[in-house]
Image (spheres, helix red, strand yellow):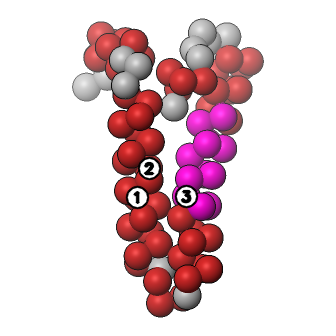
Amino acid sequence: MLRVDVYEEVEADATATGQAAIVVVLAAVCMAVGAWNGGLFYAAGLAVMELGSWLVWAGLTYVIGEKVFDGKATWGELL
C-alpha cells in the first residue's frame, strides 16, 4: 500500500536486519537443497551466491540512493 509510516517504522527497527538476514539464509538453504542433485559444491556455491547477491544488490541500491537521489540512509537500514 506504500504507506510512508510503515516504511519509517521498519527503518527505525534495529532488529529488522537480523530478521531479513534469516529470510535470506533460509532462501539460500532452500536453493541449496533444490540444487543438491548437482553435487555438494554446486549446492554450496549457489547458497553462497545467494547470500552474496543480497549484499551486492543492497550495496548497489545504497549507492544509487545516496549518490543519485541524495537519500539519507545507513547500510544497516537498507539491509
Q: Which residue position holds label 1?
A: 27
What's the residue type where badge 2 is placed?
A: Val
Q: Position of residue 48 (x, y in %)?
A: 59, 61
In the figure, is residue 67 to the left or right of 1? right
Q: How many marks?
A: 3
Instruction: Confirm or deny contact between disc 2 and disc 3 (CB under 8 A).
Output: yes
Residue 7, by quadrant, is top left
Task: Answer yes or no: is residue 7 visible.
Answer: no
Q: Position of residue 71 (x, y in %)?
A: 61, 12
What's the residue type where badge 1 is placed?
A: Ala
Circle 3 sits in a helix, a strand or a loop, which is it? helix
Where, quadrant-wise, is the N terminus in this rendering? Answer: top left
Which residue appears at 66% of the width and 44% of the height? 56
Measured along the vertical axis of the image, is residue 17 above or below residue 47? Answer: above
Query: Does the segment drawn in magenta span residue 40?
Result: no
Instruction: Confirm or deny contact between disc 1 and disc 3 (CB under 8 A).
Output: yes
What's the residue type where badge 3 is placed?
A: Glu
Q: Which residue position holds label 3?
A: 50
52 vs 8, nearest the viewer: 52
Residue 50, by quadrant, is bottom right
Q: Position of residue 64 (x, y in %)?
A: 68, 26
Image disc number at residue 7: none
Q: CA distance from mark 1 to mark 3?
A: 8 Å
Circle 2 sits in a helix, a strand or a loop, which is it? helix
Measured along the vertical axis of the image, is residue 61 above or below residue 74? Answer: below
Q: Given the current orientation, which residue lies at the most extreme left position? A: 1
Which badge, 1 or 3, comes first in the chain's sequence?
1
In the figure, is residue 59 to the left or right of 54? right
Q: Which residues are magenta?
A: 48-59
Q: Which residue position holds label 2?
A: 24
75 vs 44, nearest the viewer: 44
In the figure, is residue 48 to the left or right of 24? right
